[in-house]
Image (tube, coloured by chain):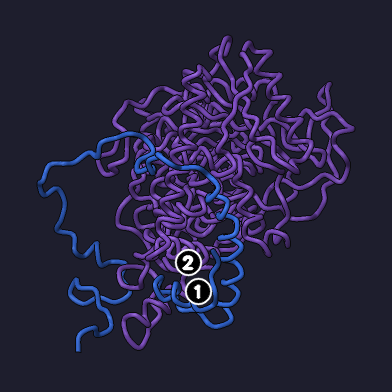
Chain colours: A purple, B blue
Amino acid sequence: MTDLTRLTIAEARAKLRGKEIKAAEITDAYLAAIDQANPVLNAYVTVTHDKACDMARASDARLGKGEGGALEGIPLGIKDLFATEGIHTQACSHVLDGFKPRYESTVSANLWADGAVMLGKLNMDEFAMGSSNETSYYGPVINPWRRSRIDTSVVPTTHEGDGGFTAPGGIKTERALDNAQLVPGGSSGGSAAAVSAFLCAGATATDTGGSIRQPAAFTGTVGIKPTYGRCSRWGIAAFASSLDQAGPIARDVRDAAILLKSMASVDAKDTTSVDRPVPDYEAAIGRSIKGMKVGIPKEYRVDGMPEEIETLWQKGIAWLKEAGAEIVDISLPHTKYALPAYYIVAPAEASSNLARYDGVRYGLRVPGKDIVDMYEKTRAAGFGNEVKRRIMIGTYVLSAGYYDAYYLQAQKVRTLIKRDFENVFAAGVDVILTPATPSAAFGIADEDMASDPVKMYLNDIFTVTVNMAGLPGISVPAGLDPKGLPLGLQLIGRPFEEETLFQTAHVIEQAAGTFQPQKWW
Amino acid sequence: MSVDLQTVKRVARLARIAVSDEEASRMTGELNTILGFVEQLGEVDVSGVEPMTSVTPMEMRKRQDAVTDGNKAADIVANAPATEENFFLVPKVVE
């Protein structure tokens, strides 16, 4: 029998509807894979065995009656940032110790309403603050990808099946892998690692500055951050409310389209949820991109960018050109200011959102001699270093006398960043192609990044502009670096034109193939 | 602009996070690195530019002024560290 965890969502959906397999079987296969792999990869912080089995049985009953929903029987992982009723929801922070909400987030409720099965809660950077999944209270997630000992640029780089690559002619080649543990990226590191390692068919994730797209790029998976307002933020622990958006991480472009269709909705409980119908994203896949105008922004060619990133970008340009797109050089002049503006706006919003964790209504409480002492001790013990750092920056930039110099200036720069995009879209550009990240996955406990927080922040240099402007962006795997690690390309679209992103990303996927890590765990 | 140890301690107090002297001095360095990084925003000419208030132009949707939810005090206090008869318990604040 084929390994059921290897099926894409689209393949599993067909087999479930055709009654070739049962939801209970596919769920069992995933639970077994998680039980085997999770002690090593640490992608899940809670596995909901019983709930998964109950949901799968209910799916089988509905499928038997021909009443299956769009995701009937599909086993998914949920990022720990989403409230799941009665189940561990801590944003991977100690401050939410023991929190089990009495309500369900809108996004996860949409998935269950469509018949999906919950496997458990996925590890992440604490409160989604981080780019390596190392700030989690539950410890780092390990990337299922490892470096190859040999330079893969001298051997064929096709890539199929379970790992490494398949040489032309179908001969499978095992790679000698380096033992160094790599990060999966962050903050949705657990989501990306679980999807990449076949520990769920797809996963929910969130993206405030790159937290879906960067880990997707680091793990050879597809991740889309939709337009701000497309997915409801209700029931998602807030980090920076004007930037946060939920989206899926999946194994291929079609699966990402299927998941986003279910996750997105119009929700009265989120006042920034946009009142427009959710299109059938999957229908966009396979549409020709002939005549589409693809913009290449010169500002994304940054100093010190590794050669393989530039090469990958050029490959992407060539693929789109071959498919009939028109390539145009564009300028987004305020790009370099997006990251510094983000590091004012996001911490400012975080410092106010995270004020609620005070040891009174939920989570951890450390006793003190009076109420203020209790607050201060609870927050000192409950938050990790990165979260404290951001609360401190946010509190400082919002404090009396500094508001105009920092926050107001950053919000004005944000207007200029958005205007840059509006100008190129008005000039007829349909989609923008950039690298997703400035490098491939790096090592756990990287000393450079540990000693300088700004070095870690630079991971989001290509993704953060999209959040600042509220636009949709997708990261799609496009190749391997010379060490055999996956690299991604990013496509940025007009507001609410996610369909264009799926359509174009699929062209890249057709040319580049899909990428799976070689199993070592 | 940069911060000194005293400012960091004051900000920590505003943020209601207890910090030791050692932590405060480590944070001073880290915060100055970050503030040094964001300093470059000062070079952008923003004259005549409106600060962003909403990323997508939208009017705030308002719902009807009607009771749509409630009668779930037990759910609301269910996750609290200390409660009594559906009240949150806190250390004494009024003498």
- Disc count in the image? 2
Name the chain letter of the residue that bears numbered label 2: A
Q: Amino acid at mark 2?
A: Met
Residue drawn at point x = 20 percent, y = 73 percent: B87
Q: Residue B45: give x, y in percent of width and height.
A: 50, 42
Quadrant in which residue A167 is drawn: top right
The verdict on a common chain for dots 2 and 1 is: no
- Residue at the spot of label 2: A392
Element under label 1?
A: helix
Name the chain letter of the residue that bears numbered label 1: B
Element under label 2?
A: helix
Q: Nearer the viewer, residue A240 or A143?
A: A240
Q: Residue A29: give x, y in percent of width and height.
A: 57, 43
- Residue at the spot of label 1: B8
Residue drawn at point x = 47 percent, y = 41 percent: A468
Q: Residue B27: give x, y in percent of width and height.
A: 57, 71
Q: Amino acid at mark 1?
A: Val
What's the distance in space between the residues labelled 2 and 1, CA to CA?
A: 8 Å
Asked whether residue A48 is in view, the answer is no
Residue A398 as seen in the image, left or right of residue A222? left
Asked if the residues shown at circle 2 and circle 1 are in contact, with their CB atoms under 8 angstroms apart, the answer is yes
Residue A387 as seen in the image, left or right of residue A266? right
Residue drawn at point x = 32 percent, y = 67 percent: B79
Where is A227 relative to A400, above or below? above
Q: Residue A487: give x, y in percent of width and height.
A: 70, 37
Where is A91 relative to A510, above or below? below
Q: Nearer the viewer, residue A213 or A241?
A: A241
Dot 1: within a 10 Å radius of its alpha carbon, few (fewer than 14), some, or many (20 or more) residues? many
